[in-house]
Image: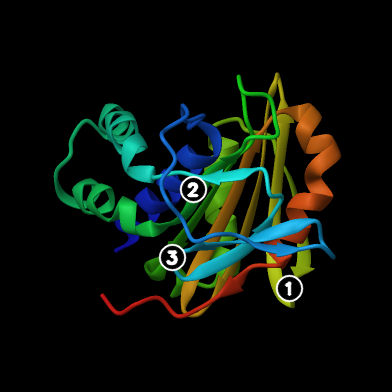
């Protein structure tokens, strides 16, 4: 079980630091609901909804899975055992995935929202400690904050260096651990961090279908 938790954390870190996914063909999603007060629209994902600027476009994570599998295989050298379980469950772990068409087409801001039931059973402080250890081991220097967003205790990690930037939010809700990551550029992060905070604070979490 400990090995599976560690590998799941590593997978999350890969999504944070290593997956500047190429654009994929967008897939049909429920029509966003306009919200003039926020200037945002409501987008629906698996077990959640989130307010985002209307320029966001939902994508199908399936198109990106081959590249992620190749990355994991190169790191762990095999698709067997625990790593195979994680790969098989990866698609179901992604609640929402897409990009902001209002940012530069060469490097659009991307958002991935992940849920994980196994890590929800671990105290959040230990999950955060594990994330920090992995980041330090990979020499990734991040700033961390504890915020209250949407009445939830939320841990926020921000990274901005050498042309790459991301901000990750971690919290628990509905017996799941949730990780929301905006992958962007330092310039976008500097002007959009408050917008990202608002979006994560707006997330409505619903019970996931029984598996």
Residue 114, horizontal then vertical, whole percent: 47, 56
Depth check: 144 or 27 in front? 27
First-in-chain label (2 vs 3): 3
Could you say which disc has been placed on residue 46 in the image?
Answer: 3
The C terminus - image quarter: bottom left
Label 3 close to label 1 by CB (< 8 Å): no
Residue 141, horizontal then vertical, whole percent: 69, 34
The reply, left or right, for residue 185 in relation to residue 68 is right
Label 2 close to label 1 by CB (< 8 Å): no
Distance from disc 2 to disc 3, alpha carbons, whole Å, reads 10 Å
The reply, left or right, for residue 156 in relation to residue 3 is right
For residue 37, which quarter of the picture? bottom right
Q: Which of marks 3 and 1 is in front?
A: 3
First-in-chain label (2 vs 1): 2
Depth check: 94 or 36 in front? 36
Colour scheme in use: rainbow
* Residue 49 appears in the rendering: yes
Q: Mark 1 points at which residue?
A: 150
Residue 2, horizontal then vertical, whole percent: 34, 60
Note whether 10 is above or below 140 in the view shown: below
The residue under the point 75% across, 68% down is 149
- How packed is label 2: few (under 14 Cα within 10 Å), some, or many (20 or more)? some
Distance from disc 3 to disc 1, alpha carbons, whole Å, reads 19 Å
- How packed is label 3: few (under 14 Cα within 10 Å), some, or many (20 or more)? some
The reply, left or right, for residue 91 in relation to residue 155 is left
Q: Callout 2: helix, strand or loop?
A: strand
Residue 131, horizontal then vertical, whole percent: 55, 50
Q: Mark 2 points at which residue?
A: 97
Q: Callout 1: helix, strand or loop?
A: loop
Q: Which of marks 2 and 1 is in front?
A: 2
């Amino acid at each position: 079980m400990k090995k599976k938790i560690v590998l799941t954390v590593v997978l999350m870190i890969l999504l944070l630091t290593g997956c500047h996914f190429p654009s994929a063909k967008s897939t049909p999603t429920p029509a966003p609901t306009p919200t003039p007060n926020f200037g945002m629209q409501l987008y629906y994902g698996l077990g959640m909804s989130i307010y985002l600027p209307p320029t966001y476009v939902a994508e199908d994570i399936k198109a990106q899975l081959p590249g992620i599998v190749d990355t994991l295989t190169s790191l762990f050298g095999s698709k067997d055992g625990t790593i195979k379980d994680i790969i098989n469950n990866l698609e179901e772990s992604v609640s929402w995935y897409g990009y902001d068409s209002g940012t530069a087409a060469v490097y659009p801001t991307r958002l991935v929202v992940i849920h994980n039931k196994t890590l929800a059973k671990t105290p959040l402080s230990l999950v955060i400690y594990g994330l920090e250890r992995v980041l330090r081991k990979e020499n990734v220097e991040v700033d961390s904050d504890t915020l209250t967003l949407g009445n939830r205790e939320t841990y926020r990690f921000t990274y901005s260096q050498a042309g790459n930037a991301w901000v990750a939010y971690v919290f628990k809700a509905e017996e799941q651990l949730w990780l929301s990551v905006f992958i962007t550029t330092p310039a976008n992060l500097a002007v959009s961090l408050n917008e990202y905070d608002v979006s994560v604070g707006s997330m409505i979490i619903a019970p996931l279908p029984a598996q």
